[in-house]
Amino acid sequence: MCGIVGYIGKRNALPIVIDGLRALEYRGYDSAGVALWDGAKIRFEKAAGRVSALESRLSRKSTLWNGKSAIAHTRWATHGKPSDRNAHPHADCQGGIFVVHNGIIENYAELREALIREGHSFLSETDTEVLAHLFERPFLSSGKIFLEDAVLEGLRHVDGTFGIAVISKHDPEKIVVARRGSPIILGVGDEEYLVASDASAIVGVTKNVVYLHDNEAAVLAPSQMQIFNLSKKAIQKSVDKIDWDISQAQKGGFDHFMQKEIFEGPSALENVFLGRLIDPPTGGGSAKLGGIVAVRDRLLRAKKIIISACGTSYYAGLVGKHYFEEFAKIPASVEYASEFRYSNPVIDSDTAAIFISQSGETADTLEALREAKKRGALALGIVNVVGSTIARESDAGVYNHAGPEIGVASTKAFVSQLGALALLALFLGRERGAVSDVLGQKLVRELKAMPAKMKRVLSGDAEIKKLAEKYLKYKNFLYLGRKYQFPVALEGALKLKEISYRHAEGYASGEMKHGPIALIDENFPTVALAPKDPVYEKILSNIQEIKARNGRVLAVATEGDAKIGKLADDVIFIPQTLEMLTPLLSVIPLQLFAYHTAVLLGLDVDKPRNLAKSVTVE
Ligand code: F6R
């Protein structure tokens, strides 16, 4: 939610922060702004709309915009609608201090009232603007003061979350940065430093990064960086290296990031398996997970598993529940993170709690993790973004290594989350004696075969596009699946609604006759997930029930299934695999179907309306 970026060093800062904004635009895209110190004064510009709107305003004046430090912001509105006025950066009364902010200042209304009583005047409706005025206060009373001291003093009054970057004409040769609850990463270049909400805005300049933790702050100057806590006690931190390339965060010949990332599904799965599958010539197959070695005994003692996540990651968790129960024979349940944390969950040190998050920054998932840890549970993370807050705060975990996911709709991350869950279930199943040698080997063999099978499904892209054209006239869809296919139905419906704005409901197919069947008529098609698995006959009956009510059916079925073609109006075929692995194949046509529908409707698939990639507010 919102992206911030800043640069200080020897180069002209403007093109660097604008590139950074473009990379961060997936985090929020309703307005953007920049402030730059040009050696004599701070120049600033803001614009409602995309980063391109800001760029076109800047292009008219770019010759004047030359300076070695700048901060910039791309917004996802929380307080105050998207407008030039509400766009960041926000300034104090005298235009001497400029702030960009990601997060929510929860007590902003009281602070704003108090500041107005003191004589401050506000220009925007945002919570962020109170920060600029809070940071102005010490300058008003004492005149000569360092910017970092003014910022730390101001932050003492703030409740809520922030990732901020601040510049000031009063103390200009620096950027002051602070974080609580919103991600901040620092880039360390050659006599240049950067700050950003995530690595995508930095990796074009440097791969050397420092992860700022909660309640930490930093001063970035052209030739040095100091890090301290919010009481200004110095902190030493190590410099890490980003293990991916700028090219991975670009479209690479595809029309959209979402399309590229759907096609990266097979390699995302290969990456999550890399070095982790044990396939001995004799004995049982298993999984080797370096990230959980330290908590192995505690994990094996766990009497139950609870999985918590949001959105697509939550649907991956629903598949994971079946994995753990079926293969590790351990009771497992799945909870929305936003519900879990307020549900007074009955968990203790005998519980292994698994938190799934692509970004590793989702506020609800992070708070659920903290709640689970407070109650004594073992907290494991299945996280894509290395060094993210959820990854750091988990006791142990499995990185999915899917590479950067830029499209707002999650696709390859889902596939790799299923891969990580399968590995964990296989490991637990073997260690707990629930998976035999023979079954272990069979699972490993089939896991290895999955990327190639996924590629086969992807090769049907043109057919799926034709189906998207055929179904374009429909405004409502029902997605049905049972057992392993129920989460896929939910995920398919989510994909369609979030990028094409078509209404779609995912349902457990057995529940259809308990209500949703009333919706069915010739204008309300059903996407039925019907691979050849133990519940296949049941879904066939559902399809028959729909056909009897004049409903159209688009089925996803297993290659060689002759029966289904006689029932469904259209069929997309996927290769045969083990039941547990069918979601890895059946989800792909649904991702492609949603993608093509949105493209055909002329919508911006990578930046759907009202959404942001990383939901760092509750
Ligand atoms: C849907 C989507 C969201 C995310 C959800 C959780 O396509 O992207 O539903 O899955 O916001 O995000 P992470 O996995 O980053 O915690």
Image: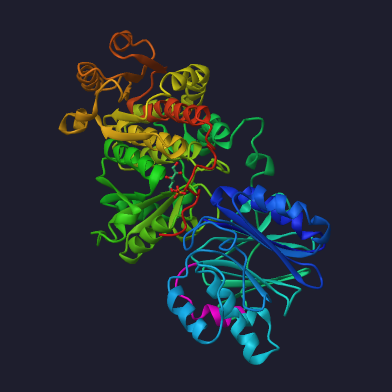
Q: In x, y percent, where is residue 321?
A: 30, 41
Q: Is residue 43 magenta?
A: no
Span shown in magenta = 151-161
> 327 or 369, which is in the foreground?
369
Give the left or right position of residue 335, taking residue 616 as reference: left
Residue 191 placement: quadrant: bottom right
Q: In x, y percent, where is residue 178?
A: 58, 70
Q: In x, y percent, where is residue 196?
A: 63, 59
Please name the residue shown 72% across and 80% down the image. 170
Regarding residue 275, the answer to whether it shows in the image is no
Residue 549 placement: quadrant: top left
The residue sitting at the left extreme is 514
Image quadrant in which the C terminus is located: bottom left
Q: Is residue 153 magenta?
A: yes
The residue sitting at the bottom extreme is 142
Eyeballing the image, is 210 above or below 547? below
Please name the residue shown 52% across and 37% down the image. 605
> 396 or 464, which is in the foreground?
464
The count of marks equals: 0
> 384 or 183, which is in the foreground?
183
Eyeballing the image, is 149 above or below 506? below
Q: In x, y percent, where is residue 133?
A: 58, 78
Regarding residue 214, the answer to whether it shows in the image is yes
Please name the residue shown 54% across and 68% down the image. 124
Eyeballing the image, is 572 above or below 130? above
> 267 or 95, which is in the foreground?
95
Give the left or right position of residue 68, taking residue 344 as reference: right
